[in-house]
Every structure is written in structure tokens, then in C-alpha cells.
Image: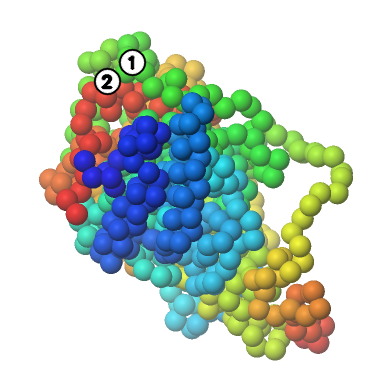
Amino acid sequence: MGLTIQEVEHIAELAKLRLTAEEKTRYREQLSAILDYANCLQAVDTTGIPQTATVLPLKNVMREDKQQPSLPPDVALANAQEKENGFFRVPPILDE
Amino acid sequence: MELHQLTVHEAAALLQSGAISARALTDAQLVRLRALQPDVKAYLHVAEKQARRQAEEADEVLSAARRDGVLVSPLTGVPLGIKDVLSLAGQPTTCGSRLLKGYMPPYTATAVEKLAREHAIFLGKTNTDEFAMGSSTENSAYFTTHNPWDLTRVPGGSSGGSAAAVAAGMAIAALGTDTGGSVRQPAALCGVVGLKPSYGRVSRYGLVAFGSSLDQVGTLTKDVTDAALLLKVIAGHDPHDSTSLDVPVPDYRQALNPDVRGVRIGVPKEYFVDGMQPAVEKAVREAIAQLARMGAEVEEISLPNTEYALPVYYLIAPAEASANLARFDGIRYGQLVETGNMWKNFRETRGQGFGPEVKRRIMLGTYALSAGYYDAYYLKAGQVRTMIKADFERAFADVDVIITPTTPKTAFKIGERIDDPLSMYLGDIFTLSVNLAGLCGLSLPCGFDENKLPIGMQILGPSLGEEKILHVAYAYEQATTWHRQRPDI
């Protein structure tokens, strides 16, 4: 089973990755080969077997809802390239 | 013996008696590190000034302890390397990625913080495959680490910088992380001891997430005793990580007993496969025979779903990675590519910032989770994961530990597998199941191949069975001399 270039482009858009034409061709081949290999799982009978998403027997882990110290704003913003008045600054998002 | 050859427990004895100072040990380590870094390239960042300052503080703690006659932690004054996916405030954390070039974490990972509280010294951040995705450090955006046993070969990965640093005497010990073998595989390829604790044993807080149901912080050390000492410090519950288990931490040193009479060892037939290097099989079988001569009871067992571990892992880990790495959008941190348009910023920042393997895994994971494919890939993989876990539960009803080779082959040449992802992934077949099942595992040296490259034996235990694997590993180590051999570098 092989992926098409259109499928590769669709996945890249879902993942918000800009790929070059050369990358699209390469990933189409490599991902097809890996998925082909992974298809051996389809032959395994998993009827009635639950999925393991975590190995721990934990359910929700709750804590008391109380105020605790957190990072000061200047520290939280220190790694941002664009910031203004104590906020992260981003380009407008509504005009596309 | 030179100072850089010391183990943690040997260094601790000298530091606590006052025979050497933390400052002298740290200086000796930094000299060694500087001399070998051009050839080995184990570190992405070296923190000389901070290390010296920490050493001075450690010396104060050590001299006060001597004066007052109190005991200090064996880690006090001991210089360590920290894998660059673990946050350490005051030092850059790049995860081996161009996208995080210059990122300075505002807080420190719990496992590292616990070592800092014991006044351990941090020499710097060690090289890793980008976001810990890889088996050779060739996926680091900065450079490839070289194996100290043969500089033309890879050190393994992703904790290859930590493993090479410990093997070459560029750190007394180091922290790594293990999502599918990233501590055990480089330990095997570099001839050191690598311990991956059970899922939940060590807090993941401050570890930049790759596969959240699989990731665990582990140790790279020169011997088994050091692994026990480090695990004792980093293990335990952390309110900042809800998946860290709230159970007591044993004193792992108590498990270091050379007597293995009556210990039941399972040897899974599925782990001795066609195509593995004959020297590896021979060395591991000989090590098992040695333990049998020492009184352990060895039996062949079966883990029938072993062949599915690789496809299951390479669906689940990328799926989790694709979700975890969604946060790297260039807004709060990372190298932003500014285009004037938000969506374009995302595509360009991520498209240019991530390397080929990370993009490959994000694509694979996104596909496995996408509409129409979720049931066939992600759900199916999660079900087969349950079967793999059940195999181990059945096996551990009858045996105390399981022994396998850590890798099918010894260290490969730099560049040999980089263009063929599937052949790179196939090198991980013996280590992946442990993470899928949440078990603990340890790799320790058990011989050399015809090129004098180290061979690793893997000892697996049930969840929270660290004492069992440390016990068997220690007994084997006491009866052999492999762990004392160091590369001629």
C-alpha cells in the first residue's frame, strides 16, 4: 500500500510542516515502506482485547484546587522572540 | 588511577575522606573533557563556570560533614553529564534541535533537581538525536557523537552523548532518557551500564516529552553499583508528574548481592534471531551460562508477540510524538521564522526547524491518528501492545528476570544506516518491548566482538523490579571484568 503525493501533502498540512518537493517524494517512499511493514499487525486477531494507552493503573489524578506559585511573567516570556506589554505577540489570525 | 576513571562510589569515598576535593575532581574532568571533545563530541554545551562554582559549594558541604561527623550523599561533588532533553535552568536545552537553538529553560527537571540537591556537579549537556528520536546521534542537528571504542562508529542513541561521555571518562556518570531503548542501546554500544527504570519510577517533569506513555529518565554509569546509587536519588513520586508512582523508593544498594543461587532466569527464544551478529549471541549465551554456573536456574521461555513490538512501537511512539511536538510553533520559545502570517509562521518554523527524522515521525504519527486510519493503526497498535504486556506478565509469573542481548549487532559505522530508516529501526528490536510494557531493563557489558567493540547483555524485570535486575547484574559484574575495560583514548 503506497501513499500518494496528495496524501503526503494532506498529512503535512495537518502537522503544519512546510515540505519541499524533494521531501514530499522522499517521505512518500519512506512512509509507504514503514506503513507497509506495520500492516503485519492487521493479521493479528485482537477481538475483545482492550487498548493499552498507559501501562499504569491510574485513573484521574486530582489535587487540591489552590493557588500556587508559578513562573513570573518576565521569566515565562524570556524565550519568546515576539512579545509586547507582557504578552506573546503573534500575527493576526483572522484574515486568512 | 586517574581521576576521570573513577566510578561514583570510588569518587565518593575519596571526596568524603578528604583525599581529593570536588574542585580538583571537577577540574580534572574538565581538562579531560576539553581534550577529548574534538574527537568524541559528547557534549552540546559545557558549563565550566557553573561546574566550578557547584564544586566549591560541594567542597563546603563535604568539609562541614567531615567536621560534624555526618554522612553526605554519595553524589556530593561528583561531576555528571546531563542529556540535552532534560531541562536545567541556567544552561541551554536544545534537544539536539535547530528549532530550540538558544532556548534557556526557566526551570529544572525533577530528576536533575534531585541530583542538584545532593550537590552533584553538572559538567554540561550531552548530545542526543533530535528530540531523542534516533539510535545513533546522527539525527542531532549539531553533530554526531563518535564512539570512544572506534571513532568511525556511532555511540548509539539517542543518549549517545551521555554513553560516550561515561565510556571516555568525560563524566563520572550521566543521565539519559529511554523511550524505546535510548539508554540501554548506547550503553551496550559504548560498553557501559545503562538502566531504564520502570515507567512511573522517575518523574518526567522537565523532560521534553517525546512519547509520554513510554519516556523514562535513566542512568549511564561505569558499573552497577553506580546505577543503584543514582536511581536511589532520582526515583520517587513528584506532584508535578501525575504518572510518577507514589510508592516508597527502596535503598537499591541493599539489592547488590553477589549470590544468585536459586534466582530464576528466563531466556526468550524469540530474542535470538537470524541475522544477529554471531559474536553477540555467543557472548550473551556465555554470560547466561556463567550465571547458571553461579547457581541461577536458567530456563527457555517464550514471548510469542515479540515480532510485533517494532511495528507497534513505530505507530504508538510517533503518534504520541506528533501530539507532543505540536507545541513547537515558535511563539513561546524556539527559532521563529517570521512571515507576517500566523499559519505560514507555523509551517515555516516547523518545516525549517525540525530535522528529517523528526518530520518523518511527526508525519507517521499524524497519519496513524488521522480520520479513517485511527482504528487500523493507532487503536490496533494499542491492542497488540496489551498482548505484548500480557506475554511479560505470564513470563514473570515463573521467572525473576529475563536475559536477552541488548542489540542484535555491535556499534555500526557512522552513515551506514542513516538513509534507510527501517534498517535503523530494526536495530532496536530487543529494547522496544520493555517500554511498551512499562518494565525496567538494564544493559551491562558482557564481552567484545572481533573488532574489540563492546557487547551488551540486557536484563529485564517486572514493573518496579529494579532490585531484581540490579541484583543479577551486580552478581555477574562481580564475577567478570568486562566493566573495568575502557577504550584506549
Q: Is residue A51 visible?
A: no
Nearer to the camera, B363 or A91: A91
Residue at (46% x, 50% y) in the render: B56
Does residue B280 appear left or right of residue B404 in this picture?
A: left
Q: Is residue B111 left or right of residue A60?
A: left
Q: Which residue is mark 1?
A: B260
Marks 2 and 1, how far apart at CA: 7 Å
* Figure colour scheme: rainbow
Q: Nearer the viewer, residue B157 or B122?
A: B122
Residue A89: x %, y % from top left: 75, 79
Res B446 → quadrant: top left
Q: Quadrant of the N terminus of chain B?
A: top left
Three-letter code for the amino acid on which mark 1 is drawn = Val
| Residue B461 picture location, percent across and down | 45, 27
Q: Residue at x 74, y 78 (%)?
A: A83
Q: Are marks 2 and 1 in contact (CB under 8 Å)?
A: yes
Residue B146: x and y in percent read 28, 60
Residue A83 visible in the displayed image: yes
Host chain of mark 1: B
B96 vs A43: above or below: below
